[in-house]
Image (cartoon, rainbow, N blue to C red):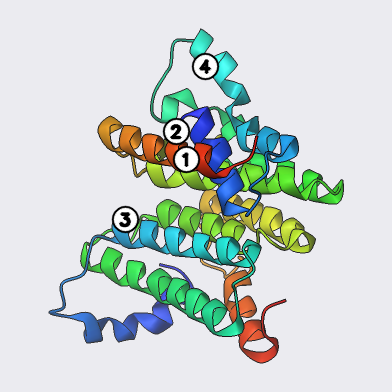
Amino acid sequence: MDFVSHVILAHFMTGTLIFSKELTFGSLFPDLDKVYVYAKRKFRRAESRTWFHELPFLSLVVLIASLTHHHLFACGVITHIFLDFVTGETRPFYPFIEKKVDYNLSLKIKAVMSVMVWASGLATIKF
Amino acid sequence: MGFWTRHYKVLDVLWEGIPLPKANIISRISVVVSALYPVLYFYGVLNKTLAVMILGCVWFLDYLDGVAARMERKEGDDVVDIACDRVSEMLIFMPYPQVFWMLSLNIWLSVYKLKTKTEFPLLLAMRQCFFVLLVWFGVP
């Protein structure tokens, strides 16, 4: 899903209706690998995700965030994992297991979901 | 076949003749239902009854996707099942940073289990234990 949907959903799921930088950074953190994969011209499905985006690495990120008392950051990462998992194609245990989990929704459905999330987020979250 | 599956596989006869959705759909529904727990918790509306219902539902769907997978003859699809379990756990335990180390440990144990294909029950039954604690003590 797109960046804005991740940020808005993170705010909704944690009940944080005032914009939070920590939560926003957490919800976008897994997408940092896009800088690398877009340079490699891989834009969709599981090939557009690296080990940075999957459970083994992100579980360590969540753990470190909780130990350093950045709970909102960890919650942002978890909501990102959830949204990608139920709407896209992932390789949850990459790089150790290559197998894909494909709940990939069509682009039309994703676009409709994004519009709904954007509209409700912009109406309720105080920036 | 998993360690516990051997024991509760006998209950599959109860589902014969009943049309079930695909195992993948049941798994996805269980992850979405798990997401209700942190949402209700953070909005302050979660009580013991709702928490027990949500976790009970997740536990039941987890069992049901195994039944559906066996009916579809896809018993080897451990990765999907285990991945859904881990994501579901991350969602349910999102309000409790004190146990994030157990989430991380369980994910790495899952990697080890899938790589070695061991049937030994390695994984922490976090949701099941939490269900029992919820019933006994209520929502923490």
Asked if labels 4 and 2 touch by Cβ distance under 8 angstroms, the answer is no
Report whether mark 2 lies on the same chain as mark 4.
yes
Q: Is residue B23 left or right of residue A23?
A: left
**What is the distance, in whole Å, between disc 1 and disc 3 at their CAs?**
15 Å
Secondary element at tag 1: helix
The image quarter containing residue B124 is bottom right
Which mark is nearer the camera, 4 or 1?
1
Q: Which residue is mark 2?
A: A1
Asked if labels 1 and 4 touch by Cβ distance under 8 angstroms, the answer is no
Q: Which residue is mark 3?
A: B24
- Decide if residue A31 is in sight here: yes
Q: Amino acid at mark 3?
A: Asn
Label 4 crowding class (10 Å Cα cut-off): few <14, some 14-19, many 20+?
Answer: some
Q: Amino acid at mark 1?
A: Asp
Q: Residue under mark 4: which chain is it in? A: A
The image quarter containing residue B123 is bottom right
**Residue A123 placed where, x, y %?**
50, 41
Q: Which residue is mark 1?
A: A84
Q: Is residue B2 left or right of residue A14?
A: left
**What is the distance, in whole Å, between disc 2 and disc 1 at their CAs?**
7 Å
Asked if labels 4 and 3 touch by Cβ distance under 8 angstroms, the answer is no
Q: Residue under mark 1: which chain is it in? A: A
